[in-house]
Amino acid sequence: MMNRRTFLKSTAAATSALIFSSARASSSYFRTLQNFFGIHPFIRHNPDAVFIMRTSVDGKTNSVAKKQVGLDFGRSVFVRLGEGEGGIPLTHKVVIKPNLTCRGKWDSRYTVLGSMGVVTDVDFVEGLIESMKELGFTGGQFFLREANCPEDFEEGGYWDMVNRTGADLRDLSAKVGVISENDLQWIEVPDGVWFRKVPYLWPVNASDTFFLNLAKFKTHAMGMTLCAKNLQGTIAHNYQAHCAAYHTDMDMSAAHKNPNAKAEILANYNRHAADRIPRWDKPGDNGGLWQETWATRCLDNNAVSHPDLHIIDGIYGRDGHFIAGPSPEGLATDYMTNMIIFGRNPFYVDNIGHWLGGHEPGNFGLFHLAIERGFCSVLDPMRIPVYEWKPDGTATLTSLSEFTRTPLKTFYLQRNYAGQSEPYWHLVDEPYDYATPVEEARISHYPQSFILRQNHPNPFNPSTAIEFTIPRDDYVRLEIFNVRGELVERLVDKFCARGAHMAVWKTHHQPSGVYFYKFRAAGFSESKRMLFLK
């Protein structure tokens, strides 16, 4: 423990000043908390990390349990912040993009219960909305946007849900030219390969919005249709038809498309096929050129659409393709996968999502193209920082191998050509050599120095989070002292892996007042003060 006399001498002046002004400062701080909110600081400080919250729902029809997951998630992830902490005004609109795609009614075996896994779970969304209303939002500030299949909203429970919550959800499926211009938010795509201008469903990407991208954990023709792809449903018809084949057009204004789009896509495809992007050599309209075309449009969209948080609802996951799937009856199956996957970067969230679905992310061209265009820099899922997130708002750096994988089969680029005989429904799980130059030059995830951040919240009651970062694996000690220099609690006293970490101090029966926390690791030492107010 540090020398008590030295501690008192070095902190007395600062402590006195803080105590003298604490009432006025805290009063001002708490006033700003009434008007601003944001994403938990630890998530904001680690934009390249992926967080996984385990859930324990016993069945996909347990509405109470699923709504509770949404409540727990929202309460732990969205917090009050002061204006000086990067807080977002509570007057903003909240845009939510759930996966509300068509539920596959073209299959004669369609049932409402059997198709639940096609869309983002409505009870989870309701819980999330209600958790944010606890911060001070009203129901009318929530806008759910989806261009596709409003005829399915009722069976998905969404009309009833928005009636209960007061959120805005409307039929916005009309094509550009028919839909009201008041319902569109046009965004330029200056460097787009396909798009030059995109019509988003207002208020998507409007300046006074907070945007949540809420995908579903499921497979699709593109592998797993997670966060990056989910955003295409925020675009008005027919500009949202990213899955249209290379040889077809999307029925959109020529003025809004790169006139050289097809030539550039074909050139890129030939280059990528020569570079041996896995499965890109599949011929035909449903082969590698189709995936190159879709991925190009997807990346154009992601270049100008910037949700504040990307979330995968994985309370239950789905294999197959809408209704069809690999079960003995030829149907898709829902599995209780019990996790919520989220983060700030959609490509890292999707990378981890693919791995948890039993696939090897290096085998998917979307990630190769995303790295090439600068949306991410890591292909190997084991190199992405992964944290287990708890409903109490704590995060623990955790090996990805500690999370359960659920194999979800897809028909993505089936290898049924050149003498190969892969089953129609398959896992894209062949080994991939990550020790290639594709990502090495741009790795930036690992910290280069020690960092001790100011605790949050501060002032606080009854608990506060303290973040620290270490540039290498090392022994760490994090301790709490009172103003007399007495050790109150040792929060961390162990060997930690390099990266960012969070410790939470629960004050229990400690008296109000000023406290100090001291961080030590490998000869580095730093202290900060904090204020506990009951």
Image: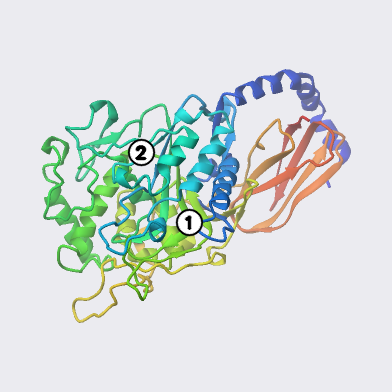
Question: For this view, does 160 lie left or right of residue 475?
Answer: left
State the residue in front, 270 or 123: 123
Provide residue 469's location: percent of width, then percent of height.
61, 48
Position of 20 relative to 221 (above/below) = above
Picture disc at residue 145: 2
> Quick one: SS at disc 2?
loop
- At x 35%, y 72%, the residue is 326
Indicate the quadrant where residue 463 lies: top right
Locate the C terminus by quadrant: top right
Question: For this view, does 354 lie left or right of residue 517?
Answer: left
- At x 29%, y 41%, the residue is 147
10 Å crowding of disc 2: few (<14), some (14-19), many (20+): many
Query: Does the residue at mark 1 contact the one at mark 2 (Cβ under 8 Å)?
Result: no
> What whole-number distance in Å separates the C-alpha atoms at marks 1 and 2?
20 Å
Indicate the quadrant where residue 237 lies: top left
State the residue in front, 2 or 285: 285
Provide residue 489's location: percent of width, then percent of height.
81, 46
The residue indicated by pointer 1 is: 314
Provide residue 321's location: percent of width, then percent of height.
32, 62
Q: Give the amino acid type for the residue marked by disc 2 in the picture.
A: Arg
The disc, 1 or 2, on the residue closer to the chain's N-terminal end is 2
10 Å crowding of disc 1: few (<14), some (14-19), many (20+): many
Q: Can residue 39 be seen in the rendering of this structure? A: no
Picture disc at residue 353: none
Q: Give the amino acid type for the residue marked by disc 1 in the picture.
A: Gly
> Quick one: SS at disc 1?
strand
